[in-house]
Image (tube, rainbow, N blue to C red):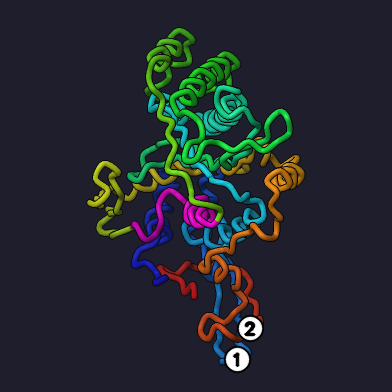
């Protein structure tokens, strides 16, 4: 893919120092910005590699590996997909999305870790509870969930994407498949999710786990907090199921472009001129007409940092049959119940992912093996405006 004309790192290098001087940022956001600024530059060091077939010399600067960096997700995504390939089952897969209302998203602005943990916890209770109900599926299910906190326009929009195999293990120990093209009723999911989340949110407030500042400072008062949440008890919360995947290969292709997304990719950046950043975004009400928004660089950085996650926070989590503690044993049982040999079911990784995993091949001839001939130590000199990341 050709290098974009403008990168997030360019914006951070030009306007990041002033932003950090004038805004009180937590340490993890300071490190995030500096990591993106230094990514694939001499500051982080690099290696010189030589091809034993065409004698091409390849200079490769090290990446920052920060999960918010748009240039560092390709290899992380490829390795994660390689691990997930062996866990797929030969069944229909479903994609269910849980969204919290704007009134709670405003609370998340000051309480990221607490609200996002509640989102994971209550979704992990909602899906299995409805799935175990004999009126619905009547089985134990497994799934994994990916947290996204942004909309296309960079506004705060926390929601959870869940990828779920279409079936589970019944109380009798047999595999029970869902109806073709239908997993669980979204209205039932939405109402249980609403009830569980509001109950947990009130408990978190009573336990003093939530903090309020600025225009929400009055919500520290229990009565004001109760009044803030009261309208949400009768509001329909957005839970929806997308079209089911056609099979394991389609799941891989979807995950390959979705799980390791960041708030904005370099390809969506249009221009940085006179302190203004322009970027493209898709309005899903009019998907055929991409829009361009222009923001002051300071506001653009602020909105990007809205979606930075605290250090150590896990944005991809596994539940039920796929929980880390017993995933291997449960998957083996599912395959036995489905009477499907594991080796015969594993789909091939998409070619783009295979290519990323084969990084030792020469990028010019695609045949020779790159041998490391020199290592450059990290440098603390000035960062070039655009580093060679070949």
Q: Residue at x 68, y 35 (%)?
A: 169
Residue density around tag 1, few if under 14, some if 14–19, many if 20 or more, within 10 Å: few
Residue pointed to by mark 2: 369
User: Nearest the camera: 128 or 176?
Assistant: 176
| Image x and y of residue 122, in percent | 56, 26
> Which label was assigned to residue 53?
1
> Which label was assigned to residue 249?
none
The total of numbered circles placed on residues is 2
Highlighted magenta segment, given as a residue range: 249-268
Residue contact at pointers 2 and 1, CB within 8 angstroms: yes
- Side of 241 relative to 76 (left or right): left
326 up-or-down from 207: above or below: below
Furthest-bottom residue in this view:
54
| Image x and y of residue 72, in percent | 53, 60
> Which image quadrant is residue 326 in?
top right
* Residue 233 part of the magenta segment: no
* Residue 265 part of the magenta segment: yes
């Amino acid at each position: 893919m050709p290098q974009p004309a403008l990168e997030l790192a360019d914006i951070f290098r030009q306007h990041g120092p002033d932003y950090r001087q004038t805004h009180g940022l937590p340490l993890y956001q300071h490190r995030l910005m500096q990591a993106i600024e230094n990514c694939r530059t001499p500051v982080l060091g690099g290696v010189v590699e030589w091809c034993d077939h065409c004698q091409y010399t390849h200079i490769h600067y090290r990446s920052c590996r920060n999960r918010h960096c748009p240039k560092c997700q390709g290899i992380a995504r490829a390795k994660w997909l390689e691990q997930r390939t062996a866990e797929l089952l030969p069944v229909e897969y479903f994609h269910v999305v849980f969204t919290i209302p704007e009134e709670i998203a405003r609370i998340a602005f000051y309480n990221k870790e607490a609200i996002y943990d509640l989102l994971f916890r209550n979704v992990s209770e909602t899906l299995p509870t409805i799935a175990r109900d004999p009126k619905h599926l009547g089985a134990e299910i497994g799934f994994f969930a990916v947290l996204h906190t942004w909309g296309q326009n960079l506004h705060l929009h926390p929601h959870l994407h869940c990828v779920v195999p279409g079936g589970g293990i019944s109380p009798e120990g047999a595999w029970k498949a869902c109806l073709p093209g239908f997993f669980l009723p979204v209205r039932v999911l939405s109402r249980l999710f609403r009830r569980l989340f509001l109950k947990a949110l009130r408990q978190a407030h009573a336990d003093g786990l939530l903090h309020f500042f600025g225009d929400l400072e009055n919500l520290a008062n229990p009565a004001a907090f109760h009044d803030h949440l009261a309208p949400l008890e009768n509001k329909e919360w957005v839970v929806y199921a997308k079209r089911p995947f056609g099979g394991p290969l389609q799941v891989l292709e979807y995950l390959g472009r979705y799980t390791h997304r960041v708030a904005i990719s370099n390809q969506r950046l249009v221009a940085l001129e006179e302190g203004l950043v322009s970027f493209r975004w898709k309005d899903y009400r009019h998907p055929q007409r991409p829009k361009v928004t222009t923001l002051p660089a300071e506001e653009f950085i602020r909105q990007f940092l809205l979606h930075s996650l605290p250090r150590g926070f896990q944005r991809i989590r596994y539940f039920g049959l796929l929980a880390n503690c017993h995933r291997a044993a449960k998957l083996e049982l599912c395959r036995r119940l489905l009477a499907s040999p594991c080796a015969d079911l594993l789909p091939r990784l998409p070619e783009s992912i295979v290519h990323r995993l084969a990084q030792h091949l020469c990028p010019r001839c695609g045949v020779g093996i790159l041998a490391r001939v020199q290592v450059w130590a990290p440098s603390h000199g000035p960062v070039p405006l655009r580093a060679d990341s070949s």
